[in-house]
Amino acid sequence: MHAISSYRGNKPRNTHKQTNPQTGAITIHCAAKLIAQCNKVKYLGVHFPGNTGLTDITDSVRKFYRKFNNIMAFLSKHPNEMSALHLIKTYCLPSLLYGCEDWHLNDSNLHKISVAWNNCFRSVFSCCRRDSIKPLQYFCRTLPMSYLIHQRKMLFGEQTLLFG
């Protein structure tokens, strides 16, 4: 719509916009053809739902679990917690945190990512669901997920200032 409305500052002929009063959906017609609208935009592997300003992290969490399950299936014959954790940090964590420097998360999305990271520790170390993961993360020299996201954002901002 931006390209259409920026044409000489005027609205092109034969273009009209209608709003459905029941659903609030907007339909735009140009020359009697419907211009398709989408609810979600994918840019550089990060999904942005329309009209919210937040980031959709479901694909990132799905990729994380997929890679994590592959590692655990491979290591099921020879379980070694520290080697599994090293593989998870180097193979799964980057797919979960890809693009996190530009994420705008609400509390529920941050909670979903933290749950995925904590479930990973619970599975590797065979912990009960009600046990705290913080001591395991401390002794494995790993930060909680909220700290990892904030750390990456700060490092990205620092690099932008230095080299931008």
Image (cartoon, helix red, strand yellow):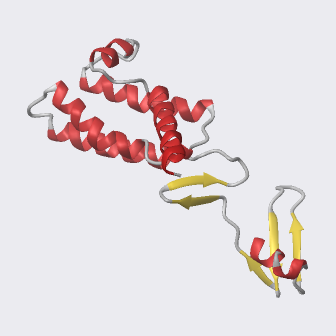
Is residue 2 placed above or below 118 in the rendered structure?
below
Look at the picture and state if 153 lies above or below 138: below
Q: Toward the viewer: 116 or 146? A: 146
Q: What residue is rendered at 28% in x and 26% in y? A: 123
- Residue 88 x, y percent position in the rendering: 27, 36
Residue at image location 43% in from the left, 47% down from the top = 98
Residue in front for this viewpoint, 127 or 90: 90
- Is residue 1 shown to the viewer in this render? no
Q: Position of residue 30 (x, y in %)?
A: 81, 82
- Residue 86: where, in percent of width, then height? 22, 33
Residue 41 falls in image quadrant: bottom right
Label total for image: 0
Q: Locate residue 39: give its quadrant.
A: bottom right
Q: Is residue 76 left or right of residue 136?
A: left
Q: Residue at x 19, y 40 (%)?
A: 73
Q: Give whichever of 32, 144 is nearer the camera.
A: 144
* Left or right of residue 162: residue 95: left
* Residue extending farthest left: 78
Residue that extends furthest to the front in the rendered view of this protein = 162
Q: Is residue 40 visible?
A: yes
- In which quadrant of the rendered image does the N terminus lie? bottom right
Using residue 129 as the reference point, say whether residue 52 is left or right of it.
right
List x then y, in percent, for residue 74.
Answer: 15, 41
